């Protein structure tokens, strides 16, 4: 069987060598005779998984000592609530940069807890370019942005704002490249795109922001999870184990290699799109995402035909988000260059066929 | 290698045949060339997993049509908050039966949202017998109990209260025997004991209790998850898949067989304990749990020696909860009778050795 290239926006592909390791040790983890998924979260072996995953992330992201790493449940969507619940308490106000659906959802939850000031919004251009934050008012508990927008295929190349408590939703580009953690108060991301599978959300938070004296339910307080080393209650343990395996693989590969590979994958695909007379991408060039490349023939029927056609080239899940249409190729860390080359091959063949 | 008997209180063992199936299809789910964990939660194949798991539970628990089945994240601990958030709104008061740590934690969260009336508490006997609810005051939004108490090894054999909105935490005995769903307003359980692995919490809720007009954040409203068929955001998809596999296995085995097997396992173990001159269990006989059997030599050093000794008989994770000490054997659905027989063999051999 040929290798399959899964361009899904998430949950997404895991490196095949990592997947084989997971399969190999699935019934017998470290000679215990048990699967990791059958093991108590209070066991020494499972605690080691949590600590290894934390150490891996600390190394990979160069997380300073004054930051805590938490592993939480509920997905990035629960962070939309936990962030204002835990951090919107001095001024009861926060600044949000609106770059699409995911920031909008975060804004909607934050409004339940205080005042939200929108410091930039690009809705009027259908989120096809990134908003700029020209003025950041004083008296904000925090400032919030989404680093990469999966739906529209936009990505901030630089940190777009400067604030003592800067918050970034990095769900779709975490560890795809180096970032400066110290410029942020809190960074969060679901694991299911660049770091493994669904079920665990990573929260990197500056320790001084973790307060016990907030009027928030136990499970929704960051302090609860900090005190318990992310084992306050039973976590999605298998998802945490996969996070450990994937971050092992990232460490072995090296973030520099991963970064170069991601740049290369995106650049050859954008080049193919820009050279094509059939396919196009109308995102402002500087704002184009290296993670999610959207493109279209501007003809829904042709788009659909291409999505089917690409399957013959072992390229699957390239359908665009429902509100945008067209195609979307997600090029997360585990997507090999060969997959992108295969997709370009499919584009060329399809384009030649259409022209005949 | 001998089979291993993992008596962990949870996460706990999964049936070995189910584990092998999971391993077999781990890299290639239904000939897609992908792992189920790499698959979009919006794909038809993954939606089928969710619907199959729901249908399996509906059959197994005989859930009436006026009840919804939800799959949520955050563990049973997040339900301690979601229940009062969503249901404590008419009288702002609820009745709780306190049978140990897990009901106490639920009580602590509920107090954040309204008045809590304790309608029975057995703290004074160290939770070694179950509390009775003699009077249930009027004007309660709901009445709450924990059906099985893993730490102390107690279990309600009958539903202990009668209320229009009766809530049960069945985390540690769900689907170990038939229960009458229609007597309840809401039943919830983490999957990692009787139904699979950690990462998914099952909520069975009567539809009239699901209200959209509650002042609760999106992710914490039952209505959000009902409308989205439990796919509002990315769930812990692999955990859901394991839930489907385990409930397939339960359906094939039949709940009647499972129930008889569970009764048999507990009865031979309690019999061995009661006949022993070394080991004992001081739980009131009628209140003894079929799921978690606690026992002790009343000598911490001997207990420790036995825990080590049992490993030679392939019986692991029988250490009692830290606040209780001694031993605890958890006999969830996946524990075969052979495991319990092996444990009894170890007890006999240890007892003989001690007497020499």
Image (tube, coloured by chain):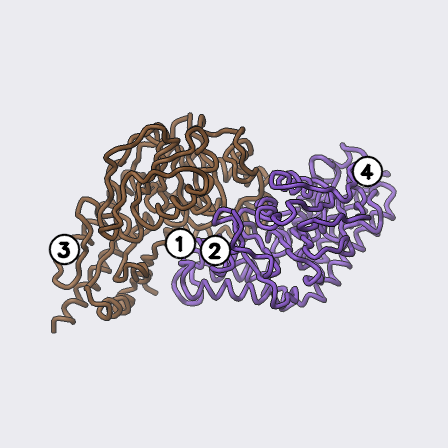
Chain colours: A purple, B brown
Label 3: element kind: helix
**Residue A107 position in % (x across, y down):** 67, 41
Q: Does label 2 lie on the same chain as label 4? A: yes
Q: Can you give x and y, in whole percent of width and height, for residue B246 in the image?
A: 40, 45
Task: Please report contact status of discs 1 and 4: CB closer than 8 Å, yes or no.
Answer: no
Residue bearing the label numbered 1: B11
What subunit carries mark 2?
Answer: A
Pointers 1 and 2 in contact (CB under 8 A)? Answer: yes
**Residue position for label 4:** A125
Labels 1 and 2 share a subunit: no
Please identify, in this view, whether the residue under mark 1 or under mark 4 is nearer the observer: 4
Q: Are marks 1 and 3 in contact (CB under 8 Å)?
A: no
Q: Of all residues shown, which one is farthest toward the bottom?
A: B356
In this view, B216 is above or below A246: above
Q: Earlier in the sequence, mark 4 or mark 2?
A: 4
Of marks 4 and 2, the one in the foreground: 4
Q: Chain of mark 3?
A: B
How far is disc 1 from disc 4 in space, using C-alphas?
A: 49 Å
Q: CA distance from mark 1 to mark 2?
A: 9 Å
**Residue A84 vertical placement versus B208 (above, below):** below
* Residue A5 seen: no
What's the CA distance linking mark 2 and mark 3? 36 Å
Q: Which residue bears the numbered disc 3?
A: B274
């Amino acid at each position: 069987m040929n290798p399959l290239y899964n361009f899904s926006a998430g949950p997404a592909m895991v490196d095949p060598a990592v997947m084989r390791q997971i399969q190999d040790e699935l019934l017998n983890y470290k000679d215990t005779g048990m699967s990791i998924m059958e093991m108590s979260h209070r066991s020494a072996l499972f605690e080691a998984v949590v600590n290894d995953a934390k150490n891996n992330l600390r190394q990979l992201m160069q997380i300073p000592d004054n930051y805590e790493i938490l592993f939480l449940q509920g997905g990035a969507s629960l962070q939309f609530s936990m962030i204002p619940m835990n951090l919107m308490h001095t001024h009861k106000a926060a600044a949000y940069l609106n770059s699409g659906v995911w920031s909008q959802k975060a804004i909607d939850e934050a409004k339940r807890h205080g005042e939200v000031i929108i410091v930039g919004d690009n809705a009027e251009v259908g989120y096809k370019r990134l908003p700029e934050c020209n003025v950041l008012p004083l008296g904000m508990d925090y400032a919030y942005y989404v680093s990469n927008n999966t739906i529209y295929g936009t990505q901030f190349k630089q940190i777009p704002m400067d604030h003592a408590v800067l918050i970034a939703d990095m769900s779709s580009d975490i560890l795809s490249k180096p970032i400066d953690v110290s410029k942020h108060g809190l960074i969060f991301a679901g694991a299911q795109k660049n770091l493994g599978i669904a079920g665990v959300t990573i929260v990197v938070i500056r320790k001084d922001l973790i307060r016990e004296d907030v009027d928030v339910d136990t499970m929704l307080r960051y302090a609860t999870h900090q005190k318990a080393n992310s084992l306050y209650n039973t976590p999605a343990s298998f998802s945490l184990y996969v996070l450990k395996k994937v971050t092992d693989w990232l460490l072995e590969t090296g973030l520099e290699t991963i970064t170069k590979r991601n740049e290369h994958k995106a650049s050859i695909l954008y080049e193919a799109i820009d050279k094509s007379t059939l396919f196009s991408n109308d995102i402002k060039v500087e704002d184009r995402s290296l993670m999610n490349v959207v493109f279209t023939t501007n003809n829904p029927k042709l788009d659909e035909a291409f999505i089917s056609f690409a399957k013959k080239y072992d390229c699957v899940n390239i359908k665009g988000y429902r509100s945008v249409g067209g195609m979307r190729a997600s090029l997360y860390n585990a997507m090999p260059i060969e997959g992108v080359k295969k997709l370009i091959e499919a584009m060329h063949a399809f384009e030649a066929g259409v022209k005949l």
